[in-house]
Image (cartoon, coloured by chain):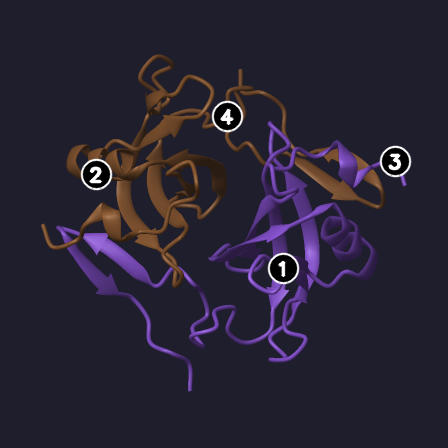
Chain colours: A purple, B brown
């Protein structure tokens, strides 16, 4: 393919942030990191695949939980140092069992919980 | 206020990524970085303020271009290491004069330009 993941800009650890967004509702679900191989795997398989910084291993989203992210469209920003993955999310994206990881709002000096874990 | 920006998780450079999303359309506009002071300024002023890594200075979005981001809601993710700012965006968010920085899609091995600069 003409697109080469090596042309993206990675940080000192060889990683690029990737924001996952629900393709149907546009809800922002989570942010995680990819290396060049994870970008290539995501495009090749259509399954969003991150690089786990804690485990130092590929993280095929939902591989164990079943909460997979099917890639609908992958986009890169103007500086080529951030990715946006439009996904079809099965179940919750967050490990707390919430749809989105961004369930805490900072309002008037307080932290407000916007959603509860899914049943 | 009860919320303390120091309780967020910053990288080795003292920065946390912040995704800006149009509060009305849910379009993801851009991603940039904040330090703890930028988080505090954003909450205090209601004007989204990043930390420019290239200039090593506060970056009050739109201060020179007029393309300001009025903060509607600031959210933090489950790991407290990523922010999501819902904003009212005046004009384009991208320095290329496009509404969003994520105007390039990676499709079938090609890079596809999704939008043109605004007039």
Residue furthest toward the bottom? A119
Q: Identify residue for label 1.
A: A87
Residue B117, percent across and down?
58, 20
Q: Is A52 positioned to the left or the right of B86 in the image?
A: right
The chain letter under disc 4 is B
Residue furthest toward the right? A1
Element type at marker 4? Answer: loop
Q: Is residue A1 above or below residue A64?
A: above
Q: Mark 2 and mark 3 in contact (Cβ < 8 Å)?
A: no
| Residue in the image at 59% along x and 51% along y | A33
Element type at marker 3? Answer: loop
Residue A28, percent across and down?
47, 55
Q: Identify residue for label 3.
A: A2
Q: Identify residue for label 2.
A: B40
Q: Nearer the viewer, mark 2 or mark 4?
A: 2
Q: Nearer the viewer, mark 3 or mark 4?
A: 3
The residues bearing labels 2 and 4 have C-alpha atoms spaced at a distance of: 23 Å
| Residue in the image at 77% along x and 40% along y | A5
Is the residue marked by circle 3 packed among few (<14), some (14-19), or many (20+) residues within 10 Å?
few
| Residue in the image at 63% along x and 65% along y | A88
Element type at marker 1? Answer: strand
Q: Is residue B65 above or below residue B43?
A: above
Disc assigned to residue A69:
none
The residues bearing labels 3 and 4 have C-alpha atoms spaced at a distance of: 25 Å
| Residue in the image at 48% along x and 73% along y | A95
Q: Are marks 1 and 4 on the same chain?
A: no
Looking at the rendering, which quadrant does residue B72 occupy?
Answer: top left
Disc assigned to residue B94:
4
The residues bearing labels 3 and 2 have C-alpha atoms spaced at a distance of: 43 Å
């Amino acid at each position: 393919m003409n697109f080469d993941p090596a042309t993206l800009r990675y940080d000192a650890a060889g990683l690029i942030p990737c924001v996952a967004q629900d393709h149907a509702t546009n809800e922002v679900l989570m942010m995680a990191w990819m290396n060049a191989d994870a970008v290539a795997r995501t495009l090749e398989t259509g399954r969003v695949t991150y690089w786990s910084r804690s485990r130092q291993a590929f993280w095929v989203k939902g591989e164990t939980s079943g909460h997979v992210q099917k890639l609908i469209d992958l986009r890169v920003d103007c500086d080529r140092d951030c990715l946006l993955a439009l996904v079809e999310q099965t179940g919750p994206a967050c490990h707390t069992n919430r749809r989105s990881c961004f369930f805490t709002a900072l309002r008037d000096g307080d932290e407000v919980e916007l959603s509860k874990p899914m049943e």
